[in-house]
């Protein structure tokens, strides 16, 4: 396997990051840890066949979701992919609601209708959960278009992977967003693999941020394993999106520690490569080390974080187990919006 | 080796169509076993083989019409070597095997058409609404499918014309009559064309086709009879009081479904009377009388939708009254289902025709060639009767004999009728 | 009530103008809808009247702008997306099927997607195989959307206005040959019913069921059947393809007992087959004859005129189908 892509070129290194502040830093760590532990539990529940269908884990990519979420307000919108547990949790969707959704229960965020790949929460402007690669980009463009037409200054954050870059809808969406100057924050989570295909075998031009620039929109590369770098870049980009308004593009270099999905035997990545990222580039471990070094984190902090998270997740699973399923007679409900009268 | 040939199933039959094989080459067959179905103008008839053995080969494919006497298959003795087969009749056998042969031996096409009527759903619904029996209708749709307008036409005709006198199917089969018209010598014709109004020049349903063919056959037969047989007629009014009284007692012992009808007594009396005047139990074969040993009384049965058959009850004289009743019921239901056997069609030695409950007093029938006589019984009526100097009401029936003057004369004929009368005065001896 | 004479395309334009003028959430988006006035001149003049924000020329990105329409609908707008023809809509089918039709259900009822997508459809203009599809049945197949086929000038205007009140995606199929058709309609733009079929001509011998561009052919066939064969055909214009107004169809069948369905799309797996099945299921005892179908011949649409004519339903084929049913 070739050496991992990763560090941005020196000339493109982002400006200095702000000083770390304890409360916020612990918040960031906690959020990442929460996602990590949630995903581990989800994997376990999947093995116990309580979660079925497809399950795509965010383990290794936590810094991206958490970092970006710091830059968004409750009024902003989020469109994500089928690997959206991290973004959903960071957005504030309750763990119990997500776990219930994956258990197929009526108390799930999508009422058990969507499963792991289709988390929706309109109250938090979380528009999925889209399972078609690239399918969410036009939706994000549309949401931003609505904001523009209604004179609202808010951001539509659109998460997608390096695989989506090959889809025609990537091209169409970036073109539309740039042409009409729509307030979309395009966030490419480049984990170097589109399911089983390495980016080098996927894209003739693997420097995704360069492609984005070709549409006439400012684009940046970010170290997606550095939560502070992600937050910094995201804040800057979101502000620009809001201010212009106009689209911005971030290519976030990251890596998923697990296979594409629970069904994937992950034979296309070398063990060395995966181990390297897990050992050397784990965003949680890296941030934890940094905080310890800066004396902002103690063992007790960590222990209590883990304990709290464990309790939260225990409760989430218990709630999901106990929750009811949607009655069968409601099968055809909400195919259409019933108009009263 | 023996040939299994196209049988004659009636004096008028010159050719028949092999409708279906019920056996395959190589299968063993027993004398008397039904091995094929033959379609004639009158009915689809099961045909039995008269030799035991193994079917060596089949010579005729289903659907082929051949003259009477044509070999249909070759039967070899069990154990004999099979003859070298030229063209394999195996396809015919396979076709026969593949042809829907229902377990109850039913004539294929007739039964099939009756159970799978070609009719549009709307027409069927309309039939229910208008009270029209759709089975007998001729359809003007493709393949003879009955359409709404066919049902509408039938309803219009029914409503315009007076009710036809088609004999109602009795719940317990009685020898329903050929319609009795006027006193002799007018021929008794088969019932007038039944309900279905014909749509002009339209393709007929298979059922309608068969009806038409049957009528043609009957027409030919009756015409020939009148042309060739010098009929003469005798009549006798028979006191039925003793028979009915005896029957009343007998029937008290039986469940309703097994009750014996007086018509059966009359048939039995005829059978026994034939022993005394045996020349009436014979057939005329062209130029001479051929007496028969067995007394097989043919009973005239009218069919739904028009048409008449007169199949035989074998050894009528040897059956008890009860057995006769059973045989009778069985014949009627099979006749109406179209599943009579060839021997029943070809072997009556005399025919009895009887008007049912709602007919007239007397009937003088037309002899069914090659038979030489036909006995007619009118409706049972109450008439004044002189008994020991007194006038009393009495149940009587008018019995007639139409006889072939080539083979008998008034004296012998009257002895026959007198014997029938006498036998009906001692019903317990029947 | 005073009337005005409009062509079909003017009627659609009138509806859009009415919508743009009365509801600020409405905007139009599609290829060449702006300065060009629309490929079929439907949106002529609207850019001048309402400006480029509300009459948005889209680049050739069907998936992109249909998806954007969906997103905009989620964001509170009422977009009217014009896909130039149903032929190009195939590029957007993923957005249609996987997003527009499913988002409500998939989100457990949280989302509504009030988007209208209009597209020209049909053949008969020698545009050849890639430009003359009648694939309405593919849309009518999808739960979660409504599919309309206005066949009259009044419906061209009224159905679009009605669709703007719908909280769910509505697809409107405008047969390209109908655009120049003219008729007198009420001056006042108003919504019409979009849930029912309409009997366009009454009769008692046979029911002709059709929609869109085939309505005219059925009416012509009905006239011929009357004049030359003494048969009174009842013509039912479906108007809505999903949901189907089975009740009206069956009511007609109850009168005539015979039915011919005329559909420009291919027969196999087509809308005529769906209607036949429903008729068989719900009106079995009404049928005096199997339901007949007159559909597009199963060929990619040929260019040569005589071949194209033979490949499409025609009044002659409809008459023949009727007279083959022995009356």
Image (spheres, coloured by chain):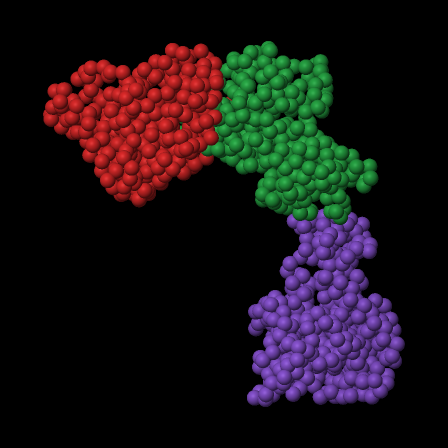
Chain colours: A red, B purple, C green
Q: Nearer the viewer, residue B112 or A105?
A: A105
Q: Quadrant of residue B79?
A: bottom right
Whether residue C97 is situated above or below residue B327 in the rendered picture: above
Name, please, the residue furthest toward the front: A11
Q: So how many labels did they put on this image?
A: 0
Whether residue C98 is situated above or below residue B49 in the rendered picture: above
Query: Horizontal and vertical percent for residue C298?
Result: 64, 44
Side of C68 relative to B148 (left or right): left
Residue name at image x 75 percent, y 85 percent: B281
Side of C43 relative to B14 (left or right): left
Whether residue B117 is situated above or below residue A304 in the rendered picture: below
Residue name at image x 66 percent, y 33 percent: C127
Query: Horizontal and vertical percent for residue B420?
Result: 74, 81
Q: Nearer the viewer, residue B365 or A58?
A: A58
Q: Nearer the viewer, residue A69 or B304?
A: A69
Q: Quadrant of residue A33?
A: top left
Side of A48 relative to C178 (left or right): left
The answer to whether residue A307 of the structure is visible from this angle is: yes
Residue name at image x 76 percent, y 88 percent: B291
Q: Nearer the viewer, residue C65 or A161?
A: A161
Residue name at image x 36 percent, y 18 percent: A76
Q: Quadrant of residue A151?
A: top left
The answer to whether residue B374 of the structure is visible from this angle is: no
Query: Horizontal and vertical percent for residue C290?
Result: 67, 47
Query: Horizontal and vertical percent for residue B267?
Result: 70, 77
The quarter in which the N terminus of chain C is drawn is top right
């Amino acid at each position: 396997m070739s050496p991992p892509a990763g560090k941005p070129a020196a000339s493109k290194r982002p400006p200095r990051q702000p000083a770390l502040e304890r409360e916020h830093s612990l918040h960031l760590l906690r959020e990442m840890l929460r996602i990590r532990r949630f995903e581990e539990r989800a994997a376990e529940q999947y093995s116990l066949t309580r979660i079925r269908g497809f399950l795509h884990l965010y383990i290794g990519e936590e810094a991206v979701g958490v970092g970006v979420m710091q830059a968004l307000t409750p009024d902003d919108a989020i469109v994500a992919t089928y690997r959206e547990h991290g973004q959903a949790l960071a957005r504030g969707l309750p763990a119990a609601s997500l776990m219930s959704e994956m258990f197929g229960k009526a108390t799930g965020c999508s009422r058990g209708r969507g499963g792991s790949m289709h988390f929706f929460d309109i109250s938090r402007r979380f528009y999925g959960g889209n399972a078609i690669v690239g399918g969410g980009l036009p939706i994000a463009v549309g949401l931003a278009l609505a904001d523009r037409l209604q004179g609202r200054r808010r951001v539509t954050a659109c998460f997608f992977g390096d695989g989506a870059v090959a889809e025609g809808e990537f091209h169409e969406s970036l073109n539309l967003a740039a042409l009409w100057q729509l307030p979309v924050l395009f966030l490419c989570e480049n984990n170097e693999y589109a399911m089983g295909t390495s980016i080098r075998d996927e894209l003739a031009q693997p420097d995704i941020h360069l492609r984005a620039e070709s549409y006439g929109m400012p684009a940046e590369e970010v170290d997606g394993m550095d939560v502070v770098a992600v937050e910094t870049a995201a804040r800057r980009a979101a502000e620009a999106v809001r201010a212009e308004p106009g689209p911005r593009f971030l290519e976030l270099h990251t890596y998923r520690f697990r296979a594409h999905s629970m069904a994937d035997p992950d034979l296309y990545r070398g063990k060395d490569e995966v181990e390297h990222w897990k050992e050397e580039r784990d965003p949680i471990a890296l941030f934890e080390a940094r905080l310890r070094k800066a004396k902002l984190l103690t063992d007790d902090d960590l222990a209590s974080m883990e304990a709290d998270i464990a309790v939260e997740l225990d409760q989430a699973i218990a709630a999901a187990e106990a929750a009811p399923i949607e009655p069968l007679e409601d099968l055809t409900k909400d195919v259409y919006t019933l108009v009263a009268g | 080796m023996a040939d299994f040939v196209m049988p004659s199933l009636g004096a008028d039959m010159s050719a028949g169509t092999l409708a279906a094989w019920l056996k395959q080459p190589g299968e063993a067959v027993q004398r008397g076993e039904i091995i094929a179905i033959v379609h004639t103008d009158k009915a689809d008839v099961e045909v039995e083989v008269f030799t035991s053995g193994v079917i060596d080969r089949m010579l005729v494919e289903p659907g082929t019409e051949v003259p009477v006497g044509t070999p249909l298959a070759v039967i070899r003795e069990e154990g004999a070597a099979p003859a070298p087969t030229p063209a394999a009749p195996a396809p015919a056998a396979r076709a026969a095997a593949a042809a829907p042969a229902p377990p109850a031996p039913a004539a294929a096409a007739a039964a099939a058409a009756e159970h799978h009527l070609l009719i549009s759903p709307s027409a069927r619904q309309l039939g229910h609404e208008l009270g029209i029996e759709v089975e007998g209708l001729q359809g003007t749709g493709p393949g003879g499918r009955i359409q709404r307008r066919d049902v509408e036409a039938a309803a219009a005709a029914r409503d315009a014309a007076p009710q036809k006198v088609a004999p109602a199917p009795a719940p317990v089969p009685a020898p329903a009559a050929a319609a009795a018209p006027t006193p002799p010598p007018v021929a008794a014709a088969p019932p007038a064309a039944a309900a279905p109004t014909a749509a002009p020049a339209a393709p007929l349903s298979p059922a309608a086709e068969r009806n038409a063919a049957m009528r043609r056959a009957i027409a030919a037969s009756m015409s020939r009879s009148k042309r060739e047989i010098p009929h003469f007629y005798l009549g006798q009014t028979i006191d039925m009081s003793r028979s009915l009284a005896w029957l009343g007692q007998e029937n008290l012992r039986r469940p309703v479904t097994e009750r014996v009808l007086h018509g059966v007594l009359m048939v039995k009396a005829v059978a026994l009377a034939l022993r005394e005047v045996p020349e009436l139990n014979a057939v005329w074969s062209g130029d001479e009388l051929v007496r028969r040993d067995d007394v097989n009384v043919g009973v005239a049965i009218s069919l739904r939708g028009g048409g008449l058959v007169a199949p035989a009850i074998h050894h009528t004289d040897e059956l008890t009254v009860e057995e006769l009743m059973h045989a009778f019921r069985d014949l009627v239901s099979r006749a109406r289902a179209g599943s009579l056997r060839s021997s029943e069609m070809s072997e009556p030695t005399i025919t009895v025709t009887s008007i049912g409950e709602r007919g007239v007093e007397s009937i003088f029938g037309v002899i069914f060639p090659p038979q030489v006589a036909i006995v007619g019984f009118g409706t049972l009526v109450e008439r004044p009767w002189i008994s020991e100097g007194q006038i009393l009401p009495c149940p009587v029936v008018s019995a007639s004999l139409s006889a072939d003057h080539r083979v008998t004369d008034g004296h012998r004929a009257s002895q026959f009728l007198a014997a029938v009368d006498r036998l009906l005065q001692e019903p317990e001896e029947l | 009530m005073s009337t005005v004479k409009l062509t079909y395309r003017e009627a659609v334009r009138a509806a859009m103008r009415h919508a743009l003028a009365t509801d600020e959430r409405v905007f139009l988006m599609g290829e060449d809808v702006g300065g060009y006035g629309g490929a079929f001149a439907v949106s002529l003049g609207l850019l001048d009247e309402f400006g480029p924000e509300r009459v948005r020329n889209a680049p050739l990105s069907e998936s992109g702008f249909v998806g954007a329409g969906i997103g905009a609908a989620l964001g509170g707008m009422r977009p009217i997306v014009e896909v130039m023809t149903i032929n190009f809509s195939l590029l957007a089918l993923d957005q249609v099927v996987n997003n527009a039709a499913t988002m409500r259900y998939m989100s457990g009822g949280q989302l509504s997607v009030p988007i209208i997508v209009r597209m020209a459809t049909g053949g008969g203009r020698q545009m050849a195989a890639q430009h003359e599809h009648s694939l309405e049945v593919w849309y009518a197949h999808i739960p979660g959307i409504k599919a309309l086929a206005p066949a009259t000038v009044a419906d061209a205007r009224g159905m679009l206005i009605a669709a703007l009140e719908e909280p769910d995606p509505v697809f409107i199929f405008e047969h390209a040959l109908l655009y120049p058709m003219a008729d007198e309609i009420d001056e006042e733009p108003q919504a019409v019913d979009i849930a029912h079929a309409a009997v366009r001509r009454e009769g008692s011998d046979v029911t002709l069921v059709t929609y869109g561009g085939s309505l005219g052919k059925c009416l012509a066939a009905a006239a011929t059947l009357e004049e030359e064969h003494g048969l009174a055909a009842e013509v039912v214009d479906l108007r809505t393809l999903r949901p189907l107004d089975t009740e009206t169809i069956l009511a007609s069948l109850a009168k005539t007992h015979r039915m011919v369905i005329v559909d420009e799309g291919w027969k196999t797996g087509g809308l005529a087959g769906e209607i036949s099945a429903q008729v068989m299921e719900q009106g079995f005892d009404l049928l005096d004859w199997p339901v007949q179908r007159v559909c597009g011949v199963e060929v990619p649409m040929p260019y040569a005129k005589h071949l194209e004519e033979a490949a499409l339903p025609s009044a002659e084929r409809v008459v023949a189908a009727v007279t083959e049913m022995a009356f």
